Amino acid sequence: MLNRIIAFVFFANYFVGLLAVALSLETAFQMNIPLNSAAYYILLFCTTVFYYTIAYSGPVIPAVSTNPRTEWYRLHYRFVRVSQVFLFCICAVLGGWYFVENFAGVLHLPLYYWLLLAVVPVAALLYYGLLPKSLISFNLRRTGWLKAFVIGFVWAGCVNLFPVAALQVERGITVAEPLLMLWLFTKNWMFCTVNAIMFDMKDYEDDANIELKTFAVRMGLRKTIYAVLIPLLLVGLVSFLAFAVYRNFGIPTILFNMVPFICLLAVAFSLQRKQSILFYLIVIDGLLLVKALCGIAGSFFVYPNLHF
């Protein structure tokens, strides 16, 4: 029973939806701005789950698969299709209501916000090649080493730019510290990129067979860990410490925010051994939840009077 629940939560991408909400909450706490409306977070959750399930909601594969996630989707294809329709309906209805409810705020959103926000969904659509082929036949998922950076960029946009823009639409509140917003966006971009590179290591053999030149395929697993993952993490850690000194963060805040980097380093070393799909879905994706929780906890030591 427990195994079925775990498979349902992680294979059906509900955990990924939870991560999007958690990282958005982290943004609000770290910038000391009010939380978005419940409708926004529900819309974010449903959109994330729907988007991540697109890749698995195609034609049913009749043959039994050795991949646990592929096999789960084969056995539950009817549920997946019904779930996708249900999620799409929620997104359409709630998105329409949100637009009408905040119409005045949408009209007054500055042009530069629209330009910044537009890049994120376009990148997300290009990742799966969802735009009409007559318009553009480009698939960012097939770009090899660039793939992880695209994933990281889309995640950073969704959990940093979108909540801030939504807050301005809902309440007319603007960001008082654009430098902090830029720093948090860059930190999330790099953190999610490292997370995506780790996931590419799971698909090393399949990507090699279709000649998709990810970091793992180009460099091998061990070299990817020591020449890409660890340097990126160390640069991120040093950058955070420099920013912490600049912002006069206290010791508790620094320690809380260092935990995700240390956990990432530990997990990176563990990838030298072959791991199961659930390891990637629970442990590696779980690092994003650890990051969100640690970021929120650290914020209480920076802002004595947090907005909620």
Image (cartoon, rainbow, N blue to C red):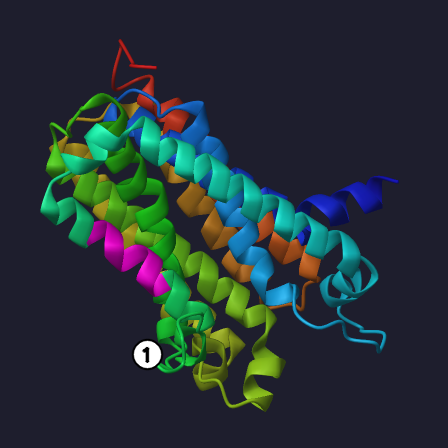
Q: Residue furthest top?
A: 305
Q: What's under tag 1, amino acid-wise?
A: Leu
Q: Can residue 256 be seen in this view?
A: no
Where residue 251 sits: x, y (%)? 29, 25
What's the residue at 67%, 69% (across, down)?
A: 274
**Tag count in the figure?**
1
Q: In the structure shown, which secondary structural element does the residue marked by tag 1 occupy? A: loop
- 30, above or below 81, in the image: above
- The residue at the far right in this view is 1
Residue 119 inside the magenta-drawn segment:
yes
Percent position of residue 132, x then y: 40, 75
Residue bounds of the magenta highlight: 116-123
Of residue 194 and residue 239, the one placed in the foreground of this image is 194
Q: Is residue 304 left or right of residue 259?
A: left
Of 148 and 134, nearer the camera is 134
Q: Position of residue 169 (x, y in %)?
A: 24, 30
- 71 to the left or right of 168: right
Quadrant hosting residue 40 = top left
Using a 10 Å C-alpha cutoff, classify the residue at mark 1 as few (fewer than 14 neighbours), some (14 to 19) or many (20 or more).
Answer: few
Q: Main secondary structure of the magenta part?
A: helix
Question: What residue appears at the point 38 percent right and 51 percent down from the top-left corner?
Answer: 155
Q: Residue at x 75, y 69 (%)?
A: 67
Which part of the image, by quadrant, shows the N terminus? top right
**Can residue 1 be seen at all in this image of the molecule?**
yes
The structure residue drawn at horizontal position 75% and vertical position 44%, both measured from the top left corner, is 6
Q: Mark 1 points at which residue?
A: 135
Depth order, front residue of 280/96? 96
